[in-house]
């Protein structure tokens, strides 16, 4: 059932009900006013009739028939349109419309009361009549019939019923017209929303303000819902793409080490009498390939997490504290390496803690492995400082080594996946993960020459975030670090490399 029809039915039922209720109140008020007016007339008439009644009682007490008849006529004349009954020591006289003599009447009242008899009602006022002399004492009753009042109230009731019967269809029709007109923006919104199909068009709900609060609020709610739907659909597509990329990369990159491990296992199985040197070399190859497989899976998993992380996982991070933890772990794993840290406390950014820790670990490991001078002790310098660029506070992270450095023409390629030297023990994904985290944190990643032109310096510049005021993190629209760069170009700031 349409909204306009529902409104018409409701209004068609409610309006007559309101008319009836209002009419009932009106009848009660009119009846009260008419009764008040009748009581006032009755009280005013009682003042004049009481004088004539006192004269009649006086004439009756002195036994003067002529005077008594004259006083009686005077009493009935004074009563005019109201009924009158006078009860005294010598009997009762009555005239005009009034209930039967057998109907009990009030003896003394200060205000009129109602008496009913044979389906009719009267307003009765009892007035005591007293005068000089022993026989001048009685009770005067004045009667005002409710016939006129009942007729007027009946007319009002009939008109109320007539108005209610007429109001039902008229109010329903008017409500339907007005509701149909008011529902036009809602129907247009429904048609616009019903015409959206994400499978055939990228168009989204375009709503012009209608100045109808409910419709505009509903349109904004639908637009917000569709925006969230688009975001979730995009994230679902990215998750599926990441899963496919993960599967493709794992199957491609794991094939070689697995085949190598299979060959070594076949050698160990086929040659049970293999000499100790060859056996140790084969076992060492197995360990090396196992470590490579494990590192490759860990890196692929980290890249997949970075592609799927949401903005609500970001928080205010003390980068100096995180760097100290990473350096401490590196020193435990490589006690012979020289790692120097230059930083100051209170350098905070808004970031994803697991991703930042992975970035630090990979930068330090890369400097330790590839930045070692020939036949010399590895030397790595990690620096953290506050910067001020483009008018906004920054935090600059630098990792420097004393190795051969990175040629200018290679400074872009080293961040692509599986780019590694032939003698590298790594998976070729460490620097890809660094570039991914830089893009996630809206940071600028650069490869520079080391101090004095020696070695390489990897520098990441983050937007700073006050610790007391968390900020909103806008993640990159597309994250495709597991994809083949030839199919889906990676989205980090290569112009700064």
Image: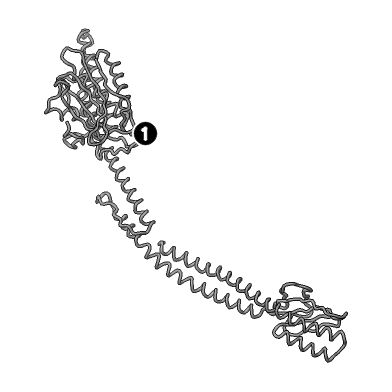
Q: Residue at x 83, y 83 (%)?
A: 57
Q: Is residue 139 visible?
A: yes
Q: As drawn, which residue projects farthest toward the front?
A: 132
Estimate the x, y position of residue 142 in percent, counting from the top left: 74, 79
Q: Residue at x 64, y 77 (%)?
A: 150
Q: Quadrant of residue 380?
A: top left
Give the position of the C terminus as an image quadrant.
top left
Q: Quadrant of residue 494?
A: top left
The residue singled out by tag 1 in the image is 468
Estimate the x, y position of residue 235 in percent, counting from the top left: 29, 40
Estimate the x, y position of residue 460 in percent, counting from the top left: 23, 29
Q: Callout 1: helix, strand or loop?
A: loop
Q: Which of 284/71 is in front?
A: 71
Q: Which of 446/250 is in front?
A: 446
Q: Which of 352/429 is in front?
A: 352
210 displayed left or right of 66? left
């Amino acid at each position: 059932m349409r909204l306009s029809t529902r409104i018409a039915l409701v209004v068609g039922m409610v309006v007559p009900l309101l008319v009836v209720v209002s009419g009932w109140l009106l009848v009660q008020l009119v009846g009260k006013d008419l009764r008040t007016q009748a009581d006032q007339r009755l009280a005013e008439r009682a003042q004049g009739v009481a004088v004539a009644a006192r004269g009649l009682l006086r004439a009756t007490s002195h036994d003067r028939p002529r005077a008594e008849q004259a006083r009686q006529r005077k009493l009935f004349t004074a009563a005019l349109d109201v009924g009158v009954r006078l009860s005294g020591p010598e009997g009762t006289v009555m005239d005009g419309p009034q209930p039967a003599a057998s109907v009990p009447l009030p003896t003394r009242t200060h205000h009129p009361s109602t008496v009913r008899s044979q389906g009719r009602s009267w307003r009765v006022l009892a007035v005591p009549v007293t005068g000089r002399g022993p026989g001048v004492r009685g009770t005067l009753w004045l009667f005002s019939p409710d016939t006129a009042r009942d007729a007027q109230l009946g007319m009002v009731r009939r008109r109320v019923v007539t108005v209610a019967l007429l109001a039902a269809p008229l109010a329903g029709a008017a409500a339907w017209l007005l509701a149909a007109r008011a529902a036009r923006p809602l129907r247009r919104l429904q048609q616009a929303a019903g015409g959206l199909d994400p499978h055939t068009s990228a168009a989204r709900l375009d709503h012009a303000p209608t100045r109808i609060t409910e419709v505009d609020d509903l349109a904004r709610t639908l637009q917000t819902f569709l925006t969230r739907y688009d975001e979730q659909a995009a994230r679902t597509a990215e998750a599926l793409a990441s899963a496919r990329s993960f599967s493709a990369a794992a199957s491609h990159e794991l094939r070689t080490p697995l085949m190598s491990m299979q060959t070594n296992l076949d050698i160990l199985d086929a040659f049970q009498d293999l000499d100790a040197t060859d056996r140790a070399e084969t076992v060492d190859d197995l360990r090396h390939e196992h470590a490579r497989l494990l590192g490759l899976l860990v890196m692929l998993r980290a890249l997949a997490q970075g592609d799927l992380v949401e903005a609500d996982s970001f928080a205010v991070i003390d980068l100096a504290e995180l760097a100290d933890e990473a350096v401490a772990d590196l020193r435990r794993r490589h006690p012979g390496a020289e790692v120097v840290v230059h930083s100051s406390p209170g350098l905070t950014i808004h970031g994803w803690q697991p991703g930042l820790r992975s970035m630090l670990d990979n930068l330090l490991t890369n400097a330790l492995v590839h930045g070692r001078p020939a036949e010399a002790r590895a030397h790595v310098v990690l620096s953290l400082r506050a910067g001020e660029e483009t008018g906004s506070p920054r935090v600059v992270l630098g990792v420097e080594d004393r190795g051969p450095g990175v040629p200018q023409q290679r400074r872009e390629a080293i961040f692509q996946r599986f780019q590694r030297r032939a003698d590298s023990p790594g998976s070729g994904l460490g620097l890809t993960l660094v570039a991914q985290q830089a893009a996630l944190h809206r940071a600028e990643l650069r490869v520079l020459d080391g101090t004095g032109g020696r070695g390489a310096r990897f520098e990441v510049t983050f937007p700073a975030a006050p610790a007391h005021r968390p900020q909103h993190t806008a993640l990159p629209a597309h994250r495709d670090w597991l994809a083949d760069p030839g199919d889906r170009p990676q989205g980090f700031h290569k112009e700064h490399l």
